[in-house]
Amino acid sequence: MKKVKRTTIYDIAAKLGITASSVSRALNNSSQVNEKTKELIMKTADELNYKRNILASNLRKGQSKTIGVVVPRINQNFFSNVIAGIEEMTYQKGYNLIICQSGEDHEKEIQCVNTLINQHVDCIVISVSADSYDYQHLQNVLDHGIQLIQFDRVAEELETLKVINDNVQASFEAVSHLIEGGYKRIGLLEGPQNLSIFKQRKEGYLKALQLYNVPVVEELIVENAWTKELGAEGTRKLLSLPHPPDAIFASTSDFSALGVLEVANLMGIKVPSELGICGYANESFSEITSPSITTIDQFSVYMGNTVANLFFQEIGNTDTTKPKIISIKPELIIRGSTKRK
Amino acid sequence: MKKVKRTTIYDIAAKLGITASSVSRALNNSSQVNEKTKELIMKTADELNYKRNILASNLRKGQSKTIGVVVPRINQNFFSNVIAGIEEMTYQKGYNLIICQSGEDHEKEIQCVNTLINQHVDCIVISVSADSYDYQHLQNVLDHGIQLIQFDRVAEELETLKVINDNVQASFEAVSHLIEGGYKRIGLLEGPQNLSIFKQRKEGYLKALQLYNVPVVEELIVENAWTKELGAEGTRKLLSLPHPPDAIFASTSDFSALGVLEVANLMGIKVPSELGICGYANESFSEITSPSITTIDQFSVYMGNTVANLFFQEIGNTDTTKPKIISIKPELIIRGSTKRK
DNA sequence: ATATTTTACGCAATCGATTGTAATTTTAAA
DNA sequence: TTTAAAATTACAATCGATTGCGTAAAATAT
């Protein structure tokens, strides 16, 4: 690529026989510079195809107008939606997004966070990876005076801004819906319990059972079933029990719910009449399986919007005594997989 | 957020009674500085929780180590996969990604590109929006000496690096497959013809018909059917023709193929025996519809990798006489929707 | 016409890291 | 012991934009 010398404010100043400071002021529309000269400067800037060097500007101003985002995977529906939602809001305000993926790996997550600290981003938005075991790196963000916003998968013990889903309530509603539909033995596919979201979803499950006086049967709860494959595996186990469940709440994701559905189909078990299935996250495919899968919508794009707005709202707010937590109420979407005649 | 004074190389230098230049050299592991002092500097840097200010560094070095990406939508499978693929490669090399979405809007696309030029990114990676009618903004990128890489949806007339799919070949294979499967009247759902990818897909369709001596019937070609809804609409039209098609190639996407499938189901037309369906892009859902949809995989993550690698390969390459075009051969994935007994 | 207030612009330091060159120290050779 | 060569380190300019402070010029008041 050819090396092009880009025009600077000095070039403009030289051409007009004035100082760079006036040019800078003009470009920032300062009232300290005469309207006539301002116009002249603008015109010449345009002629010389001037583009402000944001690096220099930000260095001087001690900001970066940049927000760093760390997610386990960019190409996962939920996360890409949240990112899209963030971008929507931040773009308007002239902020840029730097995106990193941790790949569900604690070490890489630490690296990503450090990179972003190096970049002097104004804010780091993160959804922690599944195998995160400590949060020193996040504390480090705060120690550098960088705003930190956690969303969805959050480290609860860390006092930061958070945007979360009301997982307990959502799960509670989902399981209640199953019970009210006449299902008696409800299996649970649960996710890694070090992530609070999965703990909360289990909590909602238990809460619903309790309310309806349904006994908790330990053998109906399958640990760590959070992919399609693990969901399928768990389902095989559950369905071959002497006393198998008549419904399964795949609390981890629609992917594991899909695993459930496929195993049921293979085993010739009819959904929803013999087995009810409920997933989580309203992945696009959940609508088009047969039967379609009952699931929970998390309003992911809206969640992204909320994260961005929270950031802007907190800019310049020095009262950090009470870190805000915004909880979004997800919505149960009832579909074929739980609709008994 | 509390204002924290971050430690600089000057702080380190002062503490050790040496100059900042030595500190800088030490941090860059220059051979010009004594091993002992180097260690000492490293240790103190660590103690003071030093983080290099990339803004200053890049300003001085006249680079940004940043790549800007502009796509119509982040939260669309194909694009989020490509981005994930780019990130994978660039992260290792210490490059950051700034992501923008044009929202399929020409004006916003121009804005995005200008923002990235302002940011002094080292490279802009773009897949143009569907309603782009001129490419002055892209020319502008080149004029600023910024590397430009187009992928998938490219402006052909612009001489830049490109990473594309061999759309003609892929479509040709898909339609050939349909013909060989015994389908005689093959409808085409085509996309906006100002995008070369859609033109090429049509070209592949026509090429296959010609090769097998199947006459081209104009009424079987539906324009601008590139969403699920438009695909469904087009299908209704096609299927209510006096002489309807016995197969439909939804060349725009799997979404429109899904529209076809749903209409066929509603009208009680059996897939694949009475109607064959082929989509494009291998969206995750195409595997789990019933029947599953035959489609074309574009190796999107790999495409992202390729884009990144192309960039790194071209760094410092001054020979811009022949802009490279890398074509990736997509793969036809044959599934239930075209498998006649 | 003189004094005073505004307005507009220039000067120079600054943000933090890098790097060419000069100065100093250390090491090795004579 | 002297000297040349090599290794370290210091000095100072630089990247491009911003901004506090000072001053000249213009506008207003006396």
Image (cartoon, coloured by chain):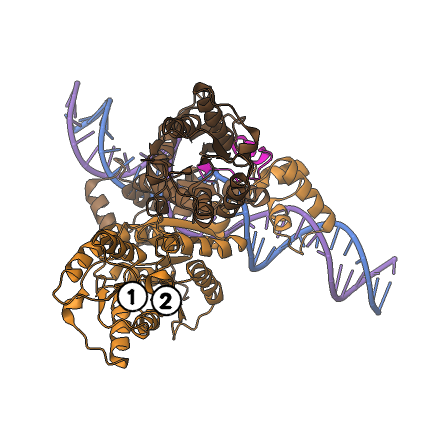
Chain colours: A brown, B orange, C blue, D purple
- Magenta residues span A121-146
In the image, residue B143 sits, relative to residue A195, either above or below, namely below
Q: Is residue B196 above or below residue A54?
A: below
Q: Looking at the image, can residue B244 be seen?
A: yes
Image position of B22 (left or right of A53): right
Name the residue at the front extreme: A242
Disc ID at residue B234? none
Q: Is residue A57 visible?
A: no
* Amino acid type of the residue that numbered disc 1 sits on in the rendered structure: Ile
The residue indicated by pointer 1 is B197
Q: Quadrant of residue B307?
A: bottom left
Q: Residue A184 versus residue A144: which sits nearer the camera?
A: A184
What type is the residue that disc 2 sits on? Ile
Measuring 27% from the left and 36% from the top, which residue is drawn there?
A32
Q: Judge whether B239 appears above or below A8 on screen.
A: below
- Rendering quarter of residue C28: bottom right
The image quarter containing residue A181 is top left
Picture disc at residue B164:
2
